[in-house]
Amino acid sequence: MEIDLNKLDKKEFLNRMIIPHIALTTFKYRARAASILKKIHADITIDQAIILKLLTVYGDMNQQEIAGCLYKDKSNLSRMCELLESRGYVTRRPDMKNNRVVKILTITDKGKLYMNKMQKVAEHLHSMATDGLTQDEIETLRRVTLKIRENLNKDIEGIL
C-alpha cells in the first residue's frame, strides 16, 4: 500500500523521509554533545574534539586531510585549528614536502591528556545515543548510513 505524503502532517512527513530523519538525528546528537561539553566547562567545540580524536587515532595530519574527514571548508577548519593551537592542544608546522601553504597538525601532551579526560564523556554520549539498540541494529545502521554516504559521493553528471 502506497502512502500519500501530501496527506501527512509535517512531523509524520519528516519521520517517513529517511534523509531529513538522519539530518535531524545528527543535529540532535551534536546539540546533546554541545550541551554536555558546556556542562563540564569544556573549552572546545564538538568539531574541535573530533579533530583531536583524529590526531589521537591517526597521528599527524595536514589540514586538508582533516577538512576532508569533517567536510569543512579550509577557512572554517583553519579557524578551528588556530583555536586548538592557541589553547595548547595542537601544534602546527609547515609541510616541508609540499610547496603550498599546508600545515601539519600534531596533538600535544596537553591535547592527549584532554582526550583521555574526554573519553568518558564520549562513551557516555555514545551509550545514551545507542540505548535500547542491539549490536545487530547498530551494525545495520552503520552499514546503511555508509551506503548512503557512498551513494552521495557518486558523480551527479548527467542528472542535472
Image (cartoon, rainbow, N blue to C red):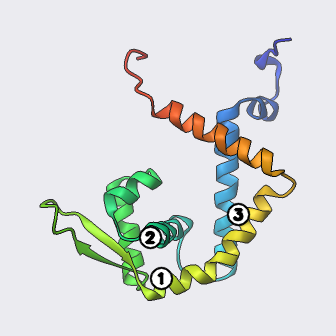
Secondary structure of the residue carrying numbered label 2: helix
Mark 2 or 1, nearer chain start:
2
Task: Tell me which corner region of the image, top left, top right, bottom left or bottom right, holds residue 55.
Answer: bottom left
In this rendering, the count of numbered labels is 3
Q: Are marks 2 and 1 in contact (CB under 8 Å)?
A: yes
Q: Residue at x 18, y 63 (%)?
A: 101
Which residue type carries mark 1?
Answer: Gly
Question: Is 10 on the left-hand or right-hand side of 41?
Answer: right
The residue under the point 66% across, 60% down is 31
The label nearer to you, 2 versus 1, is: 2
Residue closest to the far top: 1
Across and down, in percent, residue 34 comes to 64, 67
- Which mark identifies residue 37? none
* The C terminus - image quarter: top left
Position of 141 with respect to 107 (left or right) is right
> What amino acid type should be assigned to the residue bearing mark 2?
Leu
Q: Residue furthest left?
A: 99
Select label 3 or label 2 by which is in front: 2
Q: Which residue is mark 3?
A: 32
- Dot 1 falls on a residue whose secondary structure is helix
Residue 131 versus residue 30: which sits nearer the camera? 131
Most foreground residue, 99 or 86: 99
- The residue pinned by badge 2 equals 55
Mark pair 3, 1: CA separation? 22 Å
Tell me: residue 42, above or below residue 159.
below
Query: Is 146 placed above or below 105 here?
Result: above
Residue 133 in percent (x, y) is at: 83, 51
Horizontal arrangement in the rendering, residue 38 relative to residue 76 (left or right): right
Q: Position of residue 20 (x, y in %)?
A: 66, 37
* Mark 3 vs mark 2, CA separation in Å: 23 Å
